[in-house]
Image (spheres, rainbow, N blue to C red):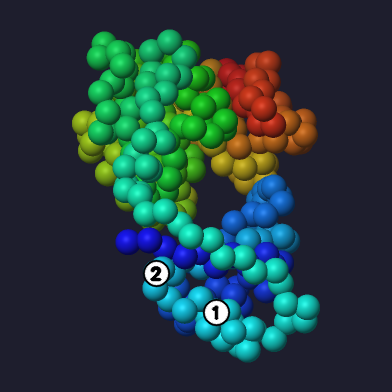
Amino acid sequence: MAWLQLIIQTNGSDAALFDDQLVELGAVAVTLQDNADQPLFEPPPGTTPIWEDTRVIGLFEDNVDIESVISALKSSVSISPFPQLKTEALEDKDWVREWMDSFHPICFGERLWVVPSWLEAPDPNAVNMLLDPGLAFGTGTHQTTALCLRWLDQQQLQDKIVIDYGCGSGILAIAAALLGASQVYCVDNDPQALLATQQNAERNNVSEKIIVHSPETMGECQADILVANILAGPLMELAPRLTALVAPNGYIALSGILAKQTNDVANRYSSAFVLAETIQDEDWVRISGQKSG
């Protein structure tokens, strides 16, 4: 089967109108894309941020009367001037195969590999984590995750207690467990993240080491190592809580921080931790340190 795409160049406030109407007019899928390379960082809780310059793409079967769809769209969405429209034919492909082919094993540090489950591990003797994109997506490809994985690879984790605060897919927690941690507490306020973490832990045969919690159910505990790959705002707000969760002489690693936010975050932790040199990967940094005894 072939497909037709109807592409609308619009703004963030009008994007939802076109989204709804395209579905009403028979689109089998609607996608919103950033049309101007505008990053969205730290949206307020409860909000759904949309780019100021947005591309709305409606996907239709190729036998649709696309001119009738356009006419109905112009009648139902009263905007003047009406945004630019474009139609494109879309070649039919094995999209599952295309998606799978875009992922490859990645090495982090000297010991740790993240390997999609359908591929062979390049080094069977390495620490190989099987992880697929899915719920609470996270496979280590983003700089913030990579910074934390490389840091974990450098630590002596044997028989240590670890906390992964803001665990997402559980990639950092599972890496810690595979690298020798005896117990890993995973904290996230998203139930889907906790479910993804449990599923990924089972796939990697470390579920007996993994304990999941919401922030509300995470009791008092002191870990040898705490990693938190979230964002600068929450890291600053959570500084007293995260500091209390690290045992004396324990270690902390923080990421999800833009380079320009380094000093603000570091200042919240410097009184309790001897901070190491900040490590940067493109626009993102990792802050790490050892808690005073």
Q: Where is residue 10 in the image (x, y as percent from the top left)?
A: 69, 67
Is 168 placed above or below 131 here? Answer: below
The local secondary structure at tag 2 comes to: strand
* Left or right relative to 150: residue 193: left
Q: How crowded is mark 1: few (under 14 residues within 10 Å), some or many (20 or more)?
A: few
Q: Is residue 234 above or below residue 292?
A: below
Position of residue 102 measured from the top left corner of the image (x, y, whole percent): 41, 36
What's the residue at 73%, 61% (across, down)?
Answer: 52
Query: Whole-Å distance between the Cαs marked 1 and 2?
Result: 13 Å
The secondary element bearing badge 1 is classed as helix
Q: Nearer the viewer, residue 251 or 120?
A: 120
Q: Quadrant of residue 74?
A: bottom right
- How many numbered discs, if any? 2
Circle 2: residue type: Glu
Nearest to the eye among marks 1 and 2: give it. Answer: 1
Q: What residue type is labelled 1?
A: Glu
| 16 sits left or right of 177 in the view | right
Front residue of 110/58: it is: 58
Residue shown at 77% from the left, 30% from the top: 263
* Mark 2 crowd level (few <14, some 14–19, many ≥20, 10 Å Cα): some
Q: Using residue 130 as the reference point, say whether residue 75 is left or right of it.
A: right
Residue 197 vertical position relative to residue 177 in the rendered view, above or below = below
Which disc is residue 67 wearing?
A: 1
x, y (%) of residue 216?
45, 54
Indicate the position of residue 62 as horizontal and vertical percent values.
41, 68
Residue that carries the numbered disc 2 in the rendered image: 61
Residue 155 visible within the image? no
Image point (23%, 38%), residue name: 202
Quadrant occupied by the N terminus: bottom left
Residue at 25% in and 23% down: 120
